Image: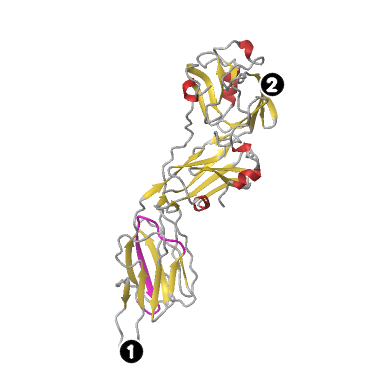
Amino acid sequence: MGVSHISNRSGQQPGGWSRRGILGVLGAVPAVALTGCGSGSADASEHTTNGTGTGTGTSGSASTKASPTATQPVISVTPADGTKKAAFTSPVEVTVTDGTLASVTVTGNDGSALAGALDETGTTWTSTSPPCSGTKYTVTARAEGGAAQTATFTTRSPGETFVGYFTPEANSTSGVGMPVSISFSHAVTDKAAVEKAITVTAEPAVEIVGHWFSSTRLDFRPKTYWAAGTTITLGLRLKDVEGADGVYGMQSKDVTFHIGRAQISTVDLSSKKMVVERDGATLATYPVSGGDSDHTTWSGIMVISERFKETRMESSTVGLGDEYDIADVPHAQRLTTSGTFIHGNYWASASIFGSRNTSHGCVGLHDTKGADDSSVAGYEFYESSMLGDVVIVKNSGERTVDAANGLNGWNLSWSDWTAGSAL
């Protein structure tokens, strides 16, 4: 029995680019810079090759004052000086005629800087990434023997946007079965571009691969459960990534999660017992009751995705009409989106636990009304559990749960999992 909704998103709001850039150095000195969008700051400095001073001049297509004895270099900037709605999908380019470039810096009004590189001729500088959307940029360029010139342009803001809501919550600690799951606010058609903009790394290091369950859901996991004590970092670099035609990402942030102890509970609905193991040792054994012959419990590997000391369960929310409506189910922990829980049960006789399967599909443990009796199995198991703990159900008489039904991707083999990556 259970409710049909699932609400395990973190509610994180979109963030800005956090990378800071250092200006590129042109001419005889190699460029040293980072690129990034957002509110991060960057120090701007200009390096010259001949020791001449700098000044401010006209830009876009501009030149220094003509000399009667020499042709003066002319510097041009793309996007042109004064552009109000420049594209943010193409790099910035600075060129010079009748000379070579000595230095170029491109800084945003958010303090960020664009890195770039000079071509072999020394006449064209191109940014290594496009500018960010909705940002005003100042380009400062100087040709050998000339004064510095500036140009400004502002990139347009994207029309439609999307964000990714991630599980688990930032800085949280979860069990070893917790995947990194991202739900997108808009359907993604360019899955490769979006997946490429997301990184998931772990310490200790392990191979981690993404799997698309749909156009709005991307999960990441290793081949086997996380090691206890692992630290996981999610890197979202979605800002200005085109996830669908004309729809761009808004986030650029890093989020850290932690894995706690390893707790894996195995429910055998033939023997009607659950064995709880923690860090490889048996912690407890509880008598249980699973789904009856008309409402068999899903088999397979399931992950606890929500926890409630008490919650209401209505049969109408899982397609069972008006068979039950219990306002105060104690110690309920969600295993599937479709409504499977492992929970306490105070309304059934204590004698059924360990002897009969009588539920509508959930796994029940003996409990008391009010959820405050620490001596019963329902209370003890709930207190020993956390989000991300693994619950394995076998001998239930039902098929293996679908991997997308909850956070249950562990039911896919590693080859099937990796086949779901867009990269």
Circle 2 residues within 10 Å: few <14, some 14–19, many ≥20: some
Q: Amino acid at mark 1?
A: Thr
| Residue ID for mark 1 | 69
| Residue ID for mark 2 | 270
In the image: residue 334, left or right of residue 20: right
Spot occupied by residue 345 in the image (x, y as percentages of width and height): 56, 16
In the image, which residues are magenta? 128-146
Separation (CA) of disc 1 from disc 2: 98 Å
Q: Where on the picture, by quarter, is residue 36?
A: bottom left
The tag on residue 81 is: none
Q: Is residue 8 above or below residue 81?
A: above
Spot occupied by residue 57 in the image (x, y as percentages of width and height): 30, 72
Spot occupied by residue 197 in the image (x, y as percentages of width and height): 50, 52
Q: Where on the picture, by quarter, is residue 295?
A: top right
Choose between 43 and 198: the one closer to the eye. Answer: 198
| Magenta-span inclusion, residue 141 | yes
